[in-house]
Image (cartoon, grey):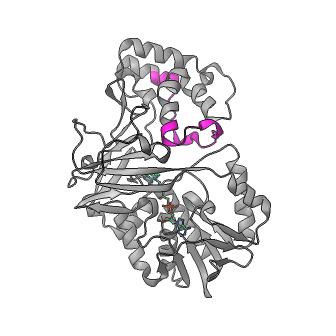
Amino acid sequence: MTKKKYLILGGGPSGLTLANKLLDKGEEDFLLIEKEDRAGGLCRTEYVGSNPVDIGGGHILDVRSERVCEYMFRFLPREKWNSFDRDSKIWFKDQFMGSPFESHIWQLPVEDQVRYIKSVAIAGCNLGTPKPEKFVDWIRWKLGDEIAENYMLPYNRKMFTSNLDSLGTYWLEKLPDVSFEDTLMSCLERRFYGKHPGHARFYYPDKEGYGDAFLAMQERLGDRYLGGVRVTSLDVENRIVNGEFTADNIIVTIPWTDIKEYKGLEDGYLDDMGRLKYSGIRVDYHLEKLPFETGAHWIYYPQESYAYHRILVLYNFSPKSTGYWTETNLERVDLLEGKADLSYKNTYAYPHNTLDKPRIMKDLLARMEKDGVIGLGRWGEWQHYNSDVVMEKAMDLAEKLA
Ligand SMILES: Cc1cc2nc3c(=O)[nH]c(=O)nc-3n(C[C@H](O)[C@H](O)[C@H](O)COP(=O)(O)OP(=O)(O)OC[C@H]3O[C@@H](n4cnc5c(N)ncnc54)[C@H](O)[C@@H]3O)c2cc1C
């Protein structure tokens, strides 16, 4: 049995940051176990020729956390990154409009603007009706029926799941909060009003992919990174993984649902884990340029007729690259046409914010901590965290542990 002080499960941004921060603190008695040889998780990069392809979909570094940016620049120096002001578009009614939708209605024909504004004006939030608990109802309550039916619901069905009914609303602070007044003003003045969505300003490497910084984090760990080992069992009470590895603390950044066998865990928690939902995406990279001109970094496609929900225009933020890639929910890949130059399937892409998830995760994390097993990151906490957020969380945990 290999015995360590800390065992980290998963070599994505959470696990890698925790491991590197432990090293910074002089803590060397740990092992990181990862199923892939190459680290990076959803942020990993593969290459087609000299073109980086982020296999987990579009990945950019938000500028907001200085602490995280400085940490990333240790592994891929600052001069190797370019910064951009976000340019994202929505393909709608045979034209490109800006995002978020509710701040760019002014780009639609006038008769559509009137219809959308009327619909926002009588949305529940503007009439003072109580906030609903379900995502599908909240979208109508917040943005009105027109935006809900023509953009938000179809787009979210394509991205997350065809069955949106189980999703709650507690996570919607991620969406930009644009008021009715902002929407109206933007139509009157024909310009953007309201709050910018996340990633308003971001970094992307000049030549490399986002994942190259994480590979450098893996390298620094040396043989404290053990790749090619899939975690299949966890004995919670005795803190034993795969019957082979044990530690004083186990930090879980892999999906709880990917661990096939648990020992020493009461049935109720196993039933709860069975209720955690997620969805996957496939990323398809095409070496050629798009058949139309655009300066956008990425484009959203709410229409059913397109299998994918988003195109990442790589050559608009990675200047030495030629191609683009699409993101398609695994439920919809059969609808894809044509052959890509590289395809990558991610079974775990989006943790679902179901109505019962906050209760399930609160109970599960509290139960695990009693035995020294800690959940961290997108899957360990089952949250829609971006990589900058999970890195901050890993840094905080390293402080606490060391
Ligand atoms: C389409 C898409 C776009 C995104 N865009 C951005 C963006 O632009 N900017 C941004 O900051 N964030 C973005 N994110 C979020 C980002 O991917 C996550 O925040 C980040 O990857 C979370 O890191 P993590 O280490 O918690 O999880 P992961 O990256 O998922 O890492 C988990 C690791 O665990 C390993 N693993 C899983 N199961 C096992 C097992 N049984 N045994 C051993 N190892 C296992 C996996 O191989 C993986 O390496 C995006 C996510 C998606 C899906």
The percent coordinates of residue 184 (x first, y second) are: 45, 19
The percent coordinates of residue 251 (x first, y second) are: 61, 71
Q: Which residues are magenta?
A: 157-183
Inspect this view and state whether residue 363 appears.
no
User: Position of 291 compared to 136: left or right?
Assistant: left
The percent coordinates of residue 194 (x first, y second) are: 45, 31
Residue in the foreground of this view, choosing between 386 and 44: 44
Question: Which quarter shows the C terminus?
Answer: bottom right
Question: Which quarter shows the N terminus?
Answer: bottom right
Residue in the foreground of this view, choosing between 341 and 97: 341
The percent coordinates of residue 86 (x first, y second) are: 34, 43
Residue 182 counted in the magenta span:
yes
Q: Is residue 278 above or below residue 81?
A: above
Residue 158 counted in the magenta span:
yes
Count all numbered tags in the image, as a single digit. Answer: 0
User: Position of 271 compared to 209: left or right?
Assistant: right
Q: Is residue 68 above or below residue 305?
A: below
User: Position of 195 compared to 98: left or right?
Assistant: right
Q: Which quarter of the figure has residue 269?
A: bottom right
Residue at horizontal 55 percent and vertical 21 percent from the top: 145
Residue at horizontal 64 percent and vertical 72 percent from the top: 233
Residue at horizontal 30 percent and vertical 50 percent from the top: 340
Q: Is residue 185 above or below residue 2?
A: above
Residue at horizontal 37 percent and vertical 13 percent from the top: 110
Inspect this view and state whether residue 94 appears.
yes
